[in-house]
Image (cartoon, grey):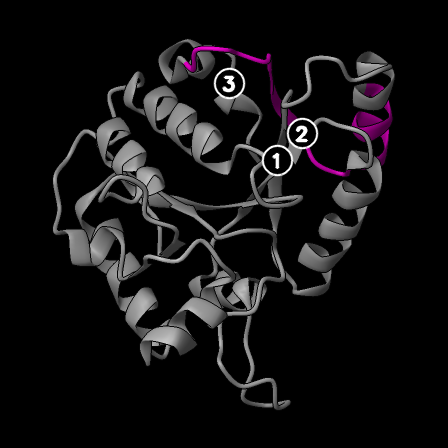
C-alpha cells in the first residue's frame, strides 16, 4: 500500500531537503519505489530550483515536473509574496491532485513543505480565505515528520511547531535532529530534552557535514521507529 509523509521544519534553512532526500534513499534501500515532491519552491539559483533537483536525484522513478513541483518562483522570498509578484494564486487543490498522482505511482512519496509549518501560501490574509503550509499538510492528510535544526533556540521552535501540528489534528510520525551548527553548545543535552518533550520517536541524528552526502545520512535513519 502506498504511503506518504509531509516533511516540515522548525524554520527555513534547517535541512528539510537534506532529510527528505535521506528518507528517499532509506526507503529505496528497502526496495521500494520512491518519489519526492516539493509543492511550492521560491528561489532559483543558476537557472534551477536546487531543492527540486535534489529531490528528483534522490527519487528512483521519473514523473512529470508539473507533478513534482506545481509552483516554482524565481525570487527567494516568502511564497505568497513571490506568487503575488508574478500574478499567480497557489491553489491547494492543484497540489492535492498532483500529490495523489505521485502516490498512485510510487510506494513512498515524500512531500517537502516550504519554510516552517505556518508559512502563508495565500495572497489573502482575510479569515476564511487565507491558508498556510499547515493547512496544506492537513489537506494532504499525511503523517508529519519534523526536522529540528539543532542550534540555539531549537527547543522553543521545536515545541511550538509540535503544538501547531497537533492543533491541526495531524499525526506527528517522528522527528529528525539535523546538526546545522557544529559549534552548538550542549548538543547532547538539547537532544535529550527534545527526546523527553516530543511525544514521537527520534528517527535519526544527522551530523554536520561540510560536503553533503545524503546516501550516508540515509544510513542513520531508523525507519522502523516511524509511527
- Residue at image location 63% in from the left, 62% down from the top: 118
Rounded to the nearest whole Å, what is the CA distance between mark 2 and mark 1? 5 Å
Secondary element at tag 2: loop
Q: Is residue 58 above or below residue 96?
A: above
- Residue at image location 70% in from the left, 36% down from the top: 200
Can you tell which of label 3 and label 2 is closer to the viewer? 3
Is there a contact, CB below 8 Å, between mark 2 and mark 1? yes
- Inspect the magenta stretch and tell me whether residue 198 lies in it: yes
Rounded to the nearest whole Å, what is the CA distance between mark 1 and mark 3? 11 Å
Which disc is residue 221 wearing?
Answer: 3
Q: Percent position (x, y) of residue 214?
A: 39, 17
Q: Callout 1: few (<14), some (14-19), or many (20+) C-alpha neighbours within 10 Å? A: many
Which residue is under mark 2? 201
Q: Residue 60 versus residue 116: which sits nearer the camera? A: 116
Is there a contact, CB below 8 Å, between mark 3 and mark 2? no
- Residue at image location 24% in from the left, 20% down from the top: 31
Q: Callout 3: few (<14), some (14-19), or many (20+) C-alpha neighbours within 10 Å? A: many
- Residue at image location 30% in from the left, 16% down from the top: 29
Q: Quadrant of residue 45?
A: top left
Which residue in the rendered view is the most extreme toward the front?
A: 46
Q: Percent position (x, y) of residue 92?
A: 39, 73
Bounds of the magenta segment: 192-212
Q: Percent position (x, y) of residue 112?
A: 43, 46
Q: Earlier in the sequence, mark 2 or mark 1?
A: 1
Secondary element at tag 3: loop
Which residue is under mark 1? 174
Amino acid at each position: 500500500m502506498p504511503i506518504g509523509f509531509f516533511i516540515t521544519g522548525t524554520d527555513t534553512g534547517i535541512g528539510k531537503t537534506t532529510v527528505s532526500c535521506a528518507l528517499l534513499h532509506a526507503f529505496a534501500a528497502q526496495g521500494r519505489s520512491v518519489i519526492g515532491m516539493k509543492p511550492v519552491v521560491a528561489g532559483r539559483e543558476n537557472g534551477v530550483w536546487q531543492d527540486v533537483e535534489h529531490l528528483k536525484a534522490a527519487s528512483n522513478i521519473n514523473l512529470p515536473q508539473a507533478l513534482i513541483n506545481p509552483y516554482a518562483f524565481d525570487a527567494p522570498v516568502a511564497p505568497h509574496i513571490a506568487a503575488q509578484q508574478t500574478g499567480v494564486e497557489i491553489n491547494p487543490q492543484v497540489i492535492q491532485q498532483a500529490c495523489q498522482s505521485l502516490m498512485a505511482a510510487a510506494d513512498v512519496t515524500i512531500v517537502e513543505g516550504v519554510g516552517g509549518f505556518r508559512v502563508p501560501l495565500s495572497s489573502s490574509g482575510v479569515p476564511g480565505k487565507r491558508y498556510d503550509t499547515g493547512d496544506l499538510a492537513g489537506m494532504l492528510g499525511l503523517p508529519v515528520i519534523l526536522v529540528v535544526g539543532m542550534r540555539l533556540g531549537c527547543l522553543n521552535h521545536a515545541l511550538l511547531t509540535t503544538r501547531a501540528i497537533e492543533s491541526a489534528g495531524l499525526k506527528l510520525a517522528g522527528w529528525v535532529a539535523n546538526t546545522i551548527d557544529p559549534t552548538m553548545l550542549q548538543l547532547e543535552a538539547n537532544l535529550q530534552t527534545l527526546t523527553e518533550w516530543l511525544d514521537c520517536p527520534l528517527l535519526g541524528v544527522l551530523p554536520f557535514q561540510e560536503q553533503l552526502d545524503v546516501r550516508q545520512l540515509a544510513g542513520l535513519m531508523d525507519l522502523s521507529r516511524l509511527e
